[in-house]
Image: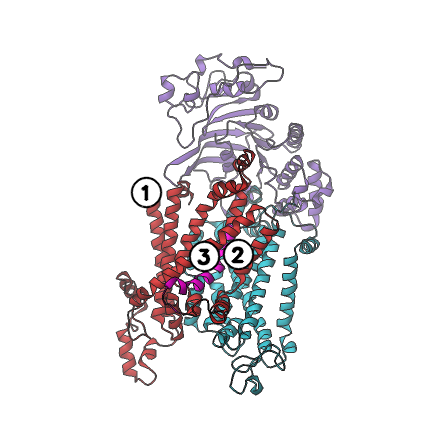
Amino acid sequence: MTAPIEVPGLETAPPRRPLRQAWRSLLRDIPALISIVALILLALAALLAPVLAPHDPLRTYAEGLTDQGAPVAPGGGFPLGTDPNGRDVLSRLLYGARVSLTIGVFANGLATLVGVAVGITAGYFGGRVDTVVSRITDVVMSFPILLFCVALITVTGPSQRNVVLVIALIYWTYLARIIRGMVLSLREREFVTATRTLGVSTVRILFRHILPHLVPAIIVYATLGVASSILIESSLSFLGVGVPVPEASWGQMIDDGRKYYEAAPWLLFAPGVCLIVTVLAFNLAGDWLRDLLDPTAPERR
Amino acid sequence: MSPVVEVEDLKVYFGRRRGGTVKSVDGVSFDIAPGETLGLAGESGSGKSTIARALLRINEPTSGRVVIGGRDVTKLRGAALKAFRRQTQMVYQDPYDSLDPRMRIGATVEEALLVRGVPASRRAAGVRELLDRVGLPASYARRYPHELSGGQRQRISIARALGVDPAVIVCDEAVSALDVSVRAQILNLLKDLQEEAGLAYLFISHDLSTMRFAADRVAVMYLGRLVEIGTRDQVFTAPRHPYTRALLAAVPVPGGRGRGPRARLAGEPPSPADPPAGCAFHPRCPLAAAECVTTRPELRRKDDGRITACHFVPDAPTGPGSEVTA
Amino acid sequence: MTPWVLRRLGQMVLVLLGVVTLAFFMSYAVPGDPARLIAGPNADAATVASIRHQLGLDASLWSQYTGFLGRLARGDLGTSYALHGAPVSEQLALALPTSALIAVGGVLWQVIIGVPAGIIAAYRPGRAADRIATLGALVGLSAPPFWVGLLLIYYLAYRLSIFPLTGLGDPMWWYLALPTFTLGLAGAAWYARMTRTQMIEVLRTPYIQLARAKGLRERTILLRHALRNVLTPLITMIGMDFGYFLGGVLIIESVFGLPGVGKLTYDAIDQLDIPMITGAVLCAAFFVVVMNFLVDLAYAAIDPRVRNRR
């Protein structure tokens, strides 16, 4: 990840009516509006998977395979066809949404929590804490993300919990670095100095004067982070070290499908489209939030 | 009355990454009595702000003593430091940066009361009272800083400082960013508050006309050292140090001759990282002689009670620039 | 060598040591007994014990660590569990040229796709072209590379038979076209975004406005003057990405069946070949750290201010 970091600004007063302002800007940004709707539908699909799924996602159906043992094409009893094991693709997609969202949200939530806490500590107190933290982030960020995840999961054994932990273990460093940089500059702002010389306790300064300024950035990066966490999870599952096998995960469904793509291309399309739509929706939502919360946007004085 | 602030041989050095130290403040002594305003003048980079920041323990003094309210505050830590914080407050230069933009005015001011331990039930009234003292309606408590003008923001800064009931307020270029008309209002407010509460001010400014209006006594700084200190009238009507004269000569005087001898100060001040040997002012001084290059003049009380640091003061009753006196 | 370079070098060594330590603990923390794994399920306890001793697995943690460091210093990454005791470093060296080719191709595609997209977007910010380019970049960023790769294989190689399906052959670049494109497509978004940001920034500066006032053609301004601003960050990104890609592009190599470091790792995962995985991870991190250092060095050579910043 070498892109320039665009940090949402520090100057903002909290918006007067945050929800109304968000709604208005959403109406002006069609791709963002579509993404938010897509994300809501996705969350509903994941939540209601047991109700919506026409079949058992884990069960091999006798009628799910042709006489030659090939997957059944979309239509008929299986709206999106079956996979090489005779399981219903649509049902697996719905349950796969659960996996992707859960892992994405939990892994990234954990990473955000740790990253913000460490970043604030390193940035505000500086000194030795900062040096140690900076070196640790240097080391962790030296490993290519996916390769590192793969190695760690090979070592710890694949499970949903381990996937979450491993992604968090790597991603916190990225947020910690961003937050640290922001706190470093916030710390030197006069209003923070003024509060400190007033005799206000450090804890109160951190929670009342530093953290509120980080909230826009945290929201933006947390949203974008879910997108990359989901991508990593799907890559891991695709490589066979993600979510363990009987469970449905989009990445692993694509892996299943790659052996049969000549005969059954739908095995590639359906989970791939779900993945790209989900990740794109999170990314678009993140970009929209960035615009919304960025003080350099024209509507601000 | 015994002084409320006594600064003795204060030194603040900064280490630089690439070796060497910057002697931002190098052996400065002064005191301030209750109810008095000491002005601290000098060009930017002279170390004025560093003194302010050392007084508030924003920057750690390298050596020397800062006695405030009878107590050396340079070594305080923890709870004692926090307790000391309440005695000395600062009004900062940048009205746009010294208030938390994400906090309502009321909350900002209330924080001072919180620090002083005012119970929650009485804080709202306290905020109203503080706003009233700085001449703002109570309704401003609900506003955010960006809705206020620069002058109004400085009033809030003052209200916040008053909230902890300090003995000393440091005004570091507190009115420099304001329009002239607003500036006068804020200066008057500061004076009123001083009379009301017997506050001592350390008033830092590079602007001599403001200084003349605000200060009772004036200390002039050059490259980390005091070069002259005296009452306002002494310094402004009969400056002794050539640097003070040059500074005053650079100020357009209302009612004075249209084109007086201006721009006595040639060139930029030297870098505090690498100050000239001897008298730091010698490269720009019209009186400089061989002695000034080798020997640094100490800040001394002269016969007439004036305190200045120049080899030539006894011999130079008049000099270039003295005709500027109004 | 200036003190800055020395300090930066020391920093790099420190990070490398951290990387190595982390990799060691990772391989140490493997659940299960590697000796048992090698000996096979039917071996008796004595055989397992002798293999364990042979591998040095019965020594203390510290002596294993120092032994690990010592062997590493001699370029010895251990022997593969799965590949009949082949030295890991040898396997990596065999796979590296393929990964290097993929890395060069991937970086090239990133620049070829990303930079023009960024320029087009920056030309009239907020207009249709900008929106399309920005959205396109985001789509590229959001598309899982393994899926894009499989789609390309399905349509361009299988259905239309334009490109070879998988593997390597002659001419080499023909076989690498799809994999490197897939790789470049994902990263191009970052290049586009960076180019756009930098260009918009520079187009607002007075000197560009002066150039406009002088009546220079917009194309000249854009390509001659504004693009210069993009060069330094571009070099950084290319250097860093090259470092990342050299360590093997797991996904791309496994989808396209290319015998690079990534494929080596992928196979090692399948067989729980811990020394091979550790070796691959170390090798990848090594390239990242070294490229990072070289980029910093190049930066400092161009812009002396960098040396004083950290």
Assess whether residue A195 is covered by the magenta stretch. Answer: no
Kindly indicate whether the residue at mark 3 contacts the one at mark 1 (C-beta within 8 angstroms).
no
Kindly indicate whether the residue at mark 2 contacts the one at mark 1 (C-beta within 8 angstroms).
no
Mark 1 lies on residue: C2
Q: CA distance from mark 1 to mark 3?
A: 36 Å
Q: Quadrant of the N terminus of chain B?
A: top right
- Say whether residue C44 is left or right of residue B241: left
Judge if badges 3 and 2 mark residues of a common chain. Answer: no
Mark 2 lies on residue: A116
Chain under disc 1: C
Q: Position of residue A144 (x, y in %)?
A: 42, 61
Chain for colour cyan: A
- From the image, state whether disc 3 or disc 2 is nearer to you: 3
* Colour seen for chain B: purple
- To which quarter of the image does residue B137 belong? top right
Q: Secondary structure at mark 2?
A: helix
Q: Which label sits on residue C109?
A: 3
The correct choice, above or below, for A289 with respect to A190 in the image is below
The magenta-colored residue range is C167-194
Q: CA distance from mark 3 to mark 2?
A: 35 Å
Chain under disc 3: C
Badge 2 crowding class, 10 Å Cα cut-off, few under 14, some 14 to 19, many 20 or more, is: many
The correct choice, above or below, for B62 with respect to C156 in the image is above
Question: Which residue is nearer to you in this view: A146 or B48?
Answer: A146
Chain for colour red: C
Assess whether residue C181 is covered by the magenta stretch. Answer: yes
Chain under disc 2: A
Q: Is any part of residue A231 visible from this angle?
A: yes
